[in-house]
Image: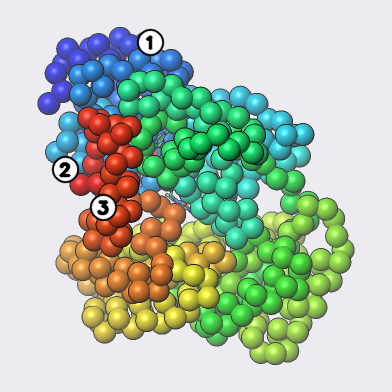
Amino acid sequence: MIDPKHMDALIKIAGPGGASQDAAELAPHLTEWRDKFQGNCPLMLMPADTKTLSAIVRYCQEHRINIVPQGGNTGLVGGGTPGLEGRDEILVSTKRMNRILAVDAEDFSITAEAGAPVAALQAAAADVDRLFPLSLASEGSCTAGGVISTNAGGVHVLRYGTTRALVLGIEAVLPTGEIVNSLSSLRKDNTGYNLAQLLVGAEGTLGIVTKATFKLSPPERQKHTCWLAVESPAVALKLLSSLREATGDRVSAFELMPRGGLEMVFSHIPGARDPLDAPYPWCVLTDVATSRPDPGLATALEAWLEAELDAGRILDGAIAATVGQGQDFWRLRESMSEAQKHEGGSIKHDISVPVSKVPAFLAEATAAIEAGYPGSRTTPFGHLGDGNIHFNIMQPKGGDKQAFLAQWEAMNAMVHDIVVSMGGSISAEHGIGTLKRDELTRLKPPAELAAMRAIKAALDPNNILNPGVLFG
Ligand SMILES: Cc1cc2nc3c(=O)[nH]c(=O)nc-3n(C[C@H](O)[C@H](O)[C@H](O)COP(=O)(O)OP(=O)(O)OC[C@H]3O[C@@H](n4cnc5c(N)ncnc54)[C@H](O)[C@@H]3O)c2cc1C
């Protein structure tokens, strides 16, 4: 239990409006979107600036009080939930540090506080005719600090890379309370270890991000969104290659969805309608975009579509006629996770394999699950363009949810072993958190794990920052 005298001291340091012990106010910060974790915490601190946060961390370091940082709380792996496994922890939310600080169109950069939502970064960039290309279904809530800490991916990785590729500089508070400021829009800086990049994907275990500068791109002035029906993931993969070639590599998103998953969207999401007339086994949603209006792109796309229809690789397809229709297509893709919530228990795998191995992975993992867990429904979908598949397995229809979910670890092990055998990753974009900690220990090469532990011990020797995350 955290000594009340320490809580009083921290409330004082946080200043007016900087703390809450109100159970109702804390409640939404103690569960995650999937309701898989239920946390517990006596105190949430909401510092208004870096200096206050630094003073909080310094106090916690001195008195060995554990801290869990939290941004938008859209993480899916129990990384930002305080008090799991009986730990005494305080929550530090960045919700009051949410300003956009600078947008520089000539520099193609944007600087914001850690609690700024991704949607606000996108809007601020658009205001100066620039693109903040990170795009994910949680963008209304997830924050700059959160996407940095999980190295979020989303639907545009194929073209713009993960968050890591977008981060130019970071200001952060280290576990000692010291402030490190590498906030800069420099594209080149070879002066030793890159602390900013070390914090990317660190899941709040090495420091608390307070500000960040991100790279921007020219806006996508012309975009074509296509919905395509295909027989199999193998055909979808061939289409990805041929579309990249046909459009001069202007594919910015390439998503794969199975029939079963789409049926769940049509059943559970109000207003969701199949864009095509017949039920095809797999569908692809793709964006082709260019930063300068180019009638040649539309012509190239139409020619490609016609050729692939003639060749029988595309069974049916539609190019969105309006921006609104394109958004309707995307709503179907973005509703895949939400729709699955209505079908009972779902066991998740956020994996990646080399792009060329996605069809083989899907075939092998689906066969293994169907043989090992008869009746369960594999519903894989995701970013075929970058090899990241959300390999979700739904409980058998009418089955017992808790009994199904009790198989989570065993199913994970089965799928992850296949992923590793193909040179893949057991966490493509959601991180490790507490959810995949044991699998990380089981599957990460020992020398890499030892190096990670050494970095953690060097920066946070008393293990006060997110002590349950990444390592046991
Ligand atoms: C509907 C939905 C769709 C999603 N789609 C995607 C997707 O396509 N791609 C993808 O990559 N992810 C996706 N996610 C997961 C999630 O949105 C991302 O992980 C996101 O990066 C989390 O940001 P957040 O601000 O909500 O962080 P939180 O959930 O608050 O925290 C996540 C982790 O980062 C740490 N953290 C948060 N802020 C800081 C900080 N300032 N300094 C240090 N550590 C910090 C926390 O301790 C925790 O470990 C999705 C989630 C949902 C609910």
Looking at the image, which is closer to me, 287 or 450?
450
Residue 293 position within the rendered picture, expressed as x and y whole percent measured from the top left: 85, 55
Amino acid, disc 3:
Arg
Amino acid, disc 2:
Glu
Which marked residue is nearer to the observer: mark 1 or mark 2? 2
Quadrant in the rendering for residue 127:
top right
Q: Pointers 2 and 3 in contact (CB under 8 A)?
A: no
Q: Against 98, is 9 above or below? A: above
Quarter of the image with the N terminus is top left
Residue bearing mark 1: 16
Quadrant in the rendering for residue 407:
bottom left
Few, some or many residues within 10 Å of mark 1 (<14, 14–19, 20+): few
Amino acid, disc 1:
Pro
Residue 30 position within the rendered picture, expressed as x and y whole percent measured from the top left: 28, 37
Kindly state the secondary structure of the residue where label 3 is placed: helix
Q: Residue at x 76, y 82 (%)?
A: 306
Residue 373 position within the rendered picture, expressed as x and y whole percent measured from the top left: 24, 78
Which marked residue is nearer to the observer: mark 1 or mark 3? 3
Residue bearing mark 3: 437
Q: Residue at x 72, y 41 (%)?
A: 130
